[in-house]
Amino acid sequence: MNRKLGTSQLVLLGLMVAILLLMAYTPLGYLNIGPLAITFNVIPVAIAAITLGPVGGAIAGSVFGLTSFLQCIGVGGTSAMGAILFDINPALAFIQRFIPRLLDGLLLGYIFRGTRKVTNTSVACMVTGFCSAFLNTAFFMTFLVVLFGNTDYLQEMMGGKNVLVFICTFVGINAVCEMVSSTIITGAVGTALNRAHFVPAPAMHSKTA
């Protein structure tokens, strides 16, 4: 049984990574609007976290982060902002593109586990999907401001605005679309996978007298 479960987890992880790569290297993963893009890659990361826990989420998030960084140098698409950040500082550009997605996937595994303790699996999947998009945006923008906030490029974009005002106006409708789509799709896919017994059952804690 354990061998079968391990094989299923490995297959699921490979599937999520394959989907991420497909979405990263085709128009399926991004809808470019201005300097930012609406990304649907947060959804496979959320599914990996739901089915495989924090480790699976972190691996999927790392793949997402790596493909996002590669777009800075024109591999698998182009990112106007990424290219500029890469020219400013390649190492910081890698951190800004990679670490937020790694943290997102890692935390989603714990968010799903914690949420499922107080509600049903379907709701927990929807919450995880929402958090996947929300945290991705929050971490991405936080790292952007912290690492590049003093550069002429970002100062010009901010235009003297308060940091929070800048973030909210900058991500705008893009973030809302990501959160809505991720919540709905992750909820539906996660529920289907749970019914197919691909989502591990909640850990049972034995009671001692």
Image (spheres, grey):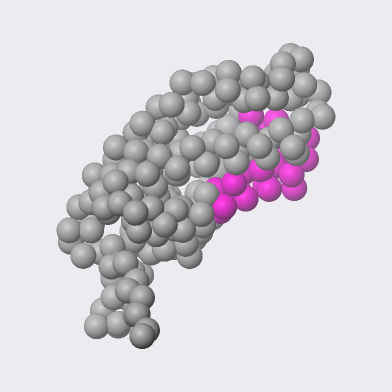
Give the dominant element type of the magenta stretch: helix, strand or loop: helix
167 sits to left or right of 67: right
- Displayed quadrant of residue 180: top left
Reply above or below: 142 against 120: above
Q: Which residue: 18% across, 61% down?
A: 196
Q: Which residue: 58% across, 32% down?
A: 79
185 sits to left or right of 110: left
Q: Is residue 36 visible?
A: yes
In the depicted view, which residue is nearer to us: 148 or 190? 190
Task: Tell me, yes or no, whether the highlighted magenta stretch contains residue 96.
Answer: yes
In the depicted view, which residue is nearer to us: 144 or 128? 128
- Quadrant assignment for the C terminus: bottom left
123 sits to left or right of 88: left
- Quadrant assignment for the N terminus: bottom left
The percent position of residue 186, horizontal first and vertical second, equals 31, 45
Q: Point out the residue furthest to the front here.
A: 209
Q: Point out the residue furthest to the bottom here.
A: 209
Q: Which residue: 72% across, 16% down?
A: 161
Q: Which residue: 30% across, 82% down?
A: 2
Q: Is residue 26 visible?
A: no
The percent position of residue 164, horizontal first and vertical second, equals 65, 25
Reply above or below: 121 against 154: below
Reply above or below: 138 against 160: below
166 sits to left or right of 207: right
The percent position of residue 112, horizontal first and vertical second, equals 39, 55
Q: Tell me where the magenta segment starts and ends, as one range.
A: 81-103
- Displayed quadrant of residue 154: top right
In the depicted view, which residue is nearer to us: 50 or 147? 50
